[in-house]
Image (cartoon, rainbow, N blue to C red):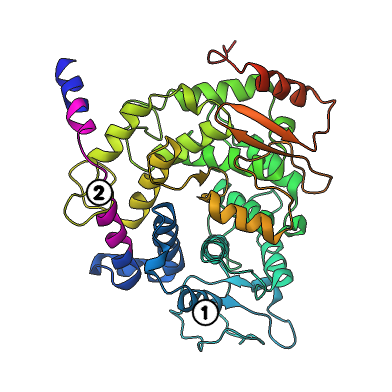
Amino acid sequence: MAQEESQFEEFEQIDFLRDRHVRFFQRTLQVLPERYASLETTRLTVMFFALSGLDVLDALDVVDRDVMIEWIYSLQVLPTEDKSNLSRCGFRGSSHIGIPYSTKGPGVLHPYDSGHVAMTYTGLCSLLILGDDLSRVNKQACLAGLRALQLEDGSFYAVPEGSENDIRFIYCAASICYMLDDWSGMDIQKAIEYIRGSLSYDNGFGQGAGRESHGGWTYCAIASLCLMGRLEEALSQRELDRIRRWCVMRQQSGFHGRPNKPEDTCYSFWVGATLELLDVFRYTNFEKNRSFILSTQDRLVGGFAKWPDSHPDPLHAYLGLCGLSLIGEPDLRKVHPALNITERAFQHLQQLQQTPIAVSTIDLTKRPTSGTWFEVRLENNFSVEQYKPSSKLRQEEKRRAVGGREKLPSVD
């Protein structure tokens, strides 16, 4: 026990090496080691990790925004003149199949060319990060491609040819609809039923019904319901409290994704953001979490690794930063817990959608098909504008605005 405490004290003395992390993400945008060759088809997602990482570090000035924006638009699968490929539209991950470089329509018909739901999500996020106005996104084509990916059980394929179908792609689909401000791209009710069916006996979410609970899938479930504005409708208060406790129990020093597994840097975001969305992240141990994340920091080349004394990679480097942002690390931009972009990029999205105020935490009661009201969360209090009263949920939020909870809710 004493040895463990001394390790934490050692970790706490490690400085956050901002400049090295900036250079790490710069290199990620320029050249990658040979071992990343297998990620060629998902290059757009690697770019997202680097761009959003630089945004969290408040260092986007080191990239050429115009060049990046043009490259992203060159990956948009646009409709052909006869619109025969409409169900295949979205964003592809890279130019690996040899489609000619073009940022304008009409699209080129190719038997193996199609959008990928995760690439469409990271592509839209990257455009928002770079300050683009999304005016060149073919919204209706993206939504048509998205509708074609949803299965009868409510889950989504990643590509039209077929792939795994699970809760991850529901999250991507919900994020796309939210960013495009149009929910015609998915059957929300079917997606909710799939999410509910993925709730396991131990109160975490799996990839689908009957599968093992996992911190990443639990994030996808809760974030999707928040973006849909259906969290309190889809899950009872008892279920929510049990999910909160399951997530809180994932902390050792950092967080792990499943019981009896070692801590992993990425779960400081996946589980931490879930707890933030469920309004109980403050009950976790920030100091131990920070100590673990910094123990995975590469002091030579920058970035964060999965575990201490391992090689850093773009995914863990980015999610490690997001984990530090959630606990309030100085000089890092705040991260929006549901969309996994910075609050700055989220506010840009709100401006594009002509929303009157910026939202610093997700409005759990915002419905895609009805009127909205907005709240700005400051510290542990709420300042509410355009408030529509009456529901039990909103009465509870009023109570929290006055005093807040003093302890983690008990679970029957």
Q: Mark 2 vs mark 1: which is more N-terminal? A: 2
Residue 18 forms part of the magenta stretch: yes
Report the magenta residues as a range.
9-25
Q: Position of residue 355 (x, y in %)?
A: 73, 52
The residue at 29%/67% (across/down) is: 27
Residue 130 picture location, percent across and down: 51, 66
Dot 2 amino acid type: Leu
* Residue at the image point whose x is 61% and y is 53% from the top: 347
Callout 2 environment at 10 Å: few (<14), some (14 to 19), or many (20+)? some
Residue 246 is left or right of residue 228, and the answer is left
Q: Which residue is mark 2?
A: 17
Foreground: disc 2 or disc 1: 2
**Quadrant of the image occupied by residue 405:** top right
Residue identifier under label 1: 70
Q: Decide whether the magenta segment is chiefly helix, strand or loop.
A: helix
Mark 2 and mark 1: Cα distance apart in space? 31 Å
Point out the image quarter for the C terminus: top right
Residue shown at the point (73%, 82%) measured from the top left:
83
Can residue 214 be seen here? The reply is no
Task: Return the x and y of residue 91 as percentages of the image width and height.
Answer: 57, 71
What is the three-letter code of the residue carrying label 1?
Glu
Q: Nearer the viewer, residue 299 or 244?
A: 299
